[in-house]
Amino acid sequence: MPTDDQTSNQAASLYSLRGKRGLILGIANQQSIAWGCAELARQLGADVVATCLNDKARKYVEPLTEPLGIDLVNCNVEDEGALSALVTHAVQRLGRIDFVIHSIAWAPLEDLHGRVIDSSSTGFARAMEVSCHSFATLAKLVTPHMSAGGSMITMTYLGADEAVPHYGLMGPVKAALESLVRYMALELGPQKIRVHAVSPGPIPTRAASGIESFDALMQHAIAKAPLQRLVTLEEIAQLCAFLCADASSGMTGQTLYVDGGCHAVD
């Protein structure tokens, strides 16, 4: 019979990321969801390669990642070959990949701030490429290096399921992303790769700052949420860490909300 200590250690290991190796995309600054995930993953024992957009962003991100021993790589997914080069670097650095967190989204401001019916085909296509299709491209590149299975996570928002004022073009883009997650879960399940979308409530990230009337959106979320507050970066990271850990081994293909309950009420 196992001792109480052995049982406790076995249970704790289910929620640990010790020994796991992950790739996290999209750190812009200390308020980034990707940063919250990277910081907690390191605290839980994971070895991490993370990305920022370019040298301008690197000035803000490197002081965060360097003290934790996180390997930081510039990556603009619109640059041809950027994702392929990133994955090659990550595999050389880590040896294998156990989890991926995709936390990047973008649309041209002129398309994001206008009506969806007024959006340009070019702007719509670029928003889809950066915010949605890059996740599929990343999966194709990464899965050969996930021989033991693992987790892939992307970030969505309630505006994928409901028409949220001022969310505009990103609503249809995130809806496509959530559908992509379900198809990827179906296709990658035989390789023991689990795929999820995490749907946080609104928090003041750099990406969110581009959304028109975002302060009003946050206030509405506080008023609507059963918990009567916004969620924190730490709470979002905790959900992502669980989805990367062995404790979530029976789950895939879901959109999981961490939004104070906003999604559950009218």
Image (cartoon, rainbow, N blue to C red):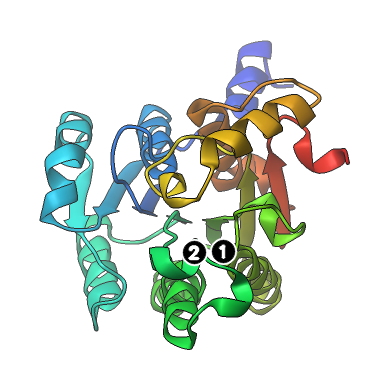
Q: Is residue 229 found left or right of 45 in the rendered image?
A: right
Instruction: Report the amino acid beneath label 1.
Output: Met
Q: Residue at x 69, y 33 (%)?
A: 221
The answer to whether residue 96 is visible is yes
Image height of 147 relative to 24, above or below: below
Q: Residue at x 49, y 61 (%)?
A: 113
Instruction: Please name which of the two marks, 1 or 2, marks the residue nearer to the observer.
Output: 2
Q: How many marks?
A: 2
As measured in the structure, the alpha-carbon distance from the residue carrying label 1 to the one carrying label 2 is 7 Å
Q: Nearer the viewer, residue 48 or 207?
A: 207
Which quadrant is home to the N terminus?
top right
Horizontal and vertical percent position of residue 173: 58, 70
Which residue is disc 1 drawn over?
170
Which residue is disc 2 drawn over?
112
Image height of 61 relative to 232, above or below: below
Q: Residues within 10 Å of mark 2 (few under 14, many from 20)?
A: many
Horizontal and vertical percent position of residue 45: 38, 33
Which quadrant of the view contains residue 37? top left
